[in-house]
Image (cartoon, helix red, strand yellow):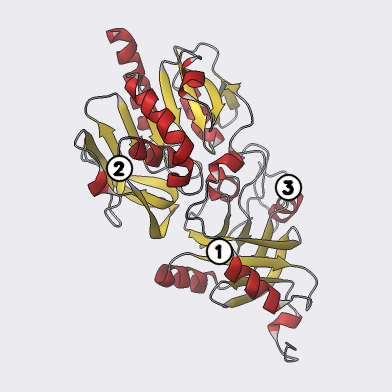
C-alpha cells in the first residue's frame, strides 16, 4: 500500500507492529532486521542492561516505561548472561551520550553488537496502556532503511507469531554443561569477589539463571555448582549438595515442568533444603501438585510491593513473570508466605513438612532494591541447620 507523502512511515527507520494491527513508527536503535516476540513493559527506572540480559525475557520485546534509557551507557559488569535472550526493545527517546564513570560503550552500539533490535521515538505510555487494557500480545520490530518497511508483511508476521503459552523456553537459555561458580556480589571500588572458603555446597539448576543470583548464593558461603535444566535428580545428587536451588527462567512452567517436575519431586523427597525463584517457584509448586496460569498483564518492574506474611514486613521487589501459581491449588502442606500488595498474587510459599520454600520475585536486586536479600541468608541458615541436625 502506497503511503501518503506526509506519512511518518517515509521518514521512519523502525516500526513496532502489534498483532491487533496497531503500528508505531520510530527510529531504529541497535541491530537492523526483524524480530518478533511477546510485547511487554517494564517499569524499572534503573538497570536496563540487566533487564535486557535477563534470560527470563527470552521470546519477548521489552517496552521501557522510564524515558531515560541509555543515559549511563553499558559496561561488561552489569550482564546477567553472556548473550541477551530478549528479542527487542522499545524506547520513548533515542539514548543520549552516556554519562557515567563505569560506562565503556553506548547502548546503541552494545545492542547492535548483540543483535538486539530496538525502536525509539515511540509513545511508550500509549503502548503501556494498550497492554494494560488488552493484555499481552505478540508484536514485530522492524529496523531498516527509511521508507522500505513492508507493512502488510509485518502485520501478518505479528499476527502469526506463536504464543508463549505451551512453550518451553528454558531449554533455549540453560547452560550446555555443568560448571562451578565462585563469583560473589560486586562492591564499589572492589568489583566482584571470590568465594574461597565455602561452608556448604549448593547445586543450582539453570532454567535461565541470572548471574547475580549465583553471586548471591556464593556470597552466603556456598560452593555453587550449576547444572543444565535437563539434569536428572541422580545427576544433581551425585554432586552431594547440601542444598538445591531452582533458578528463574522464561516460558510456560507447565511446558518446562514436563521434564523438570518429576526430577524436582525426587529432590523434595530427599529432605535437602530447596529454594526456588520465579520459574523455580512455579516448578516447585507444580511438583507439589499445584497449578499455574498465564497472567493478564504480568509483573515486570523493580517497584512491586510484597508482604512477607511470616514477619509482617513489606518489601519492594523486582519482578519479571507472565505466569503465576494459582494459590487455591496449593496442597495442605504448603503455606503461603508472601503475597503481592498490587493484586494479591501468590508471591511465595513453603512446605510445612520439608525444608522447601520459594518466591515468585527476584531477591538478587539486579536491577532493584535489596529488600529481599535476606532470602539468601534464610536459605543458608536452613542448610546449616539441616547439616547440624543430621
From the top left corner, tell me how far across and down residue 197 is, in percent. Answer: 51, 11
Which residue sits at x=31%, y=40%? Answer: 348
Left/right of residue 108 with respect to residue 145 in the rendered view = left
**Residue 67, which numbered label?**
1
Disc 2 target residue: 290
Q: Is residue 389 above or below residue 370?
A: above
Left/right of residue 273 with respect to residue 27 in the rendered view = left
The reply to whether residue 363 is in sight is yes
Callouts 1 and 2 close, C-beta under 8 Å: no
Disc 3 target residue: 105
Q: Secondary structure at mark 1?
A: loop
Q: Nearer the viewer, residue 93 or 50?
A: 50
Left/right of residue 319 with respect to residue 307 in the rendered view = right
The image quarter containing residue 90 is bottom right
Quadrant in which the N terminus is drawn: bottom right
Q: Specify few, some or many for label 3: CA neighbours under 10 Å numbering under 14, 14-19, or 20 or more.
A: some
Mark nearest the camera among 1 and 2 is 2
Amino acid at each position: 500500500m502506497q503511503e501518503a507523502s506526509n506519512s511518518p512511515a517515509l521518514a521512519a527507520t523502525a516500526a513496532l507492529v502489534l498483532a491487533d494491527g496497531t503500528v508505531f513508527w520510530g527510529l531504529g536503535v541497535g541491530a537492523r532486521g526483524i524480530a518478533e516476540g511477546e510485547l511487554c513493559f517494564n517499569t524499572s527506572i534503573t538497570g536496563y542492561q540487566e533487564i535486557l540480559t535477563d534470560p527470563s525475557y527470552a521470546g519477548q520485546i521489552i517496552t521501557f516505561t522510564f524515558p531515560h534509557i541509555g543515559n549511563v551507557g553499558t559496561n561488561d559488569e552489569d550482564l546477567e548472561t553472556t548473550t541477551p535472550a530478549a528479542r527487542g526493545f522499545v524506547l520513548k527517546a533515542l539514548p543520549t551520550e552516556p554519562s557515567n564513570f563505569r560506562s565503556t560503550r553506548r547502548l546503541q552500539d552494545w545492542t547492535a553488537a548483540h543483535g538486539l533490535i530496538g525502536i525509539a521515538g515511540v509513545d511508550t505510555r500509549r503502548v503501556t496502556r494498550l497492554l494494560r487494557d488488552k493484555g499481552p500480545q505478540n508484536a514485530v520490530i522492524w529496523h531498516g532503511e527509511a521508507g522500505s518497511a513492508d507493512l502488510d508483511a509485518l502485520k501478518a508476521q505479528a499476527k502469526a507469531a506463536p504464543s508463549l503459552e505451551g512453550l518451553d523456553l528454558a531449554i533455549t537459555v540453560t547452560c550446555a554443561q555443568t560448571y562451578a561458580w565462585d563469583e560473589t556480589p560486586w562492591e564499589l571500588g572492589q568489583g566482584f569477589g571470590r568465594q574461597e572458603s565455602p561452608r556448604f555446597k549448593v547445586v543450582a539448576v539453570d532454567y535461565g539463571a541470572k548471574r547475580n543470583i549465583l553471586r548471591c548464593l556464593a556470597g552466603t558461603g556456598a560452593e555453587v555448582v550449576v547444572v543444565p535444566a535437563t539434569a536428572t535428580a541422580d545427576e544433581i545428587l551425585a554432586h552431594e549438595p547440601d542444598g538445591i536451588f531452582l533458578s528463574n527462567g522464561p516460558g510456560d512452567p507447565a511446558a518446562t515442568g514436563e521434564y523438570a517436575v518429576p526430577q524436582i519431586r525426587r529432590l523434595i523427597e530427599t529432605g535437602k533444603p530447596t529454594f526456588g525463584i520465579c520459574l523455580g517457584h512455579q516448578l516447585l509448586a507444580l511438583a507439589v501438585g499445584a497449578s499455574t496460569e498465564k497472567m493478564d498483564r504480568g509483573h515486570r518492574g523493580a517497584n512491586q510491593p510484597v508482604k512477607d506474611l511470616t514477619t509482617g514486613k513489606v518489601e519492594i521487589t523486582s519482578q519479571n513473570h507472565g505466569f503465576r501459581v494459582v494459590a487455591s491449588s496449593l496442597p495442605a502442606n504448603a503455606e503461603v508466605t508472601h503475597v503481592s500488595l498490587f493484586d494479591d498474587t501468590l508471591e511465595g510459599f513453603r512446605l510445612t513438612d520439608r525444608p522447601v520454600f520459594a518466591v515468585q520475585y527476584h531477591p538478587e536486586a539486579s536491577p532493584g532494591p535489596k529488600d529481599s536479600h535476606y532470602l539468601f541468608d534464610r536459605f543458608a541458615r536452613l542448610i546449616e541447620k539441616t547439616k547440624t541436625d543430621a
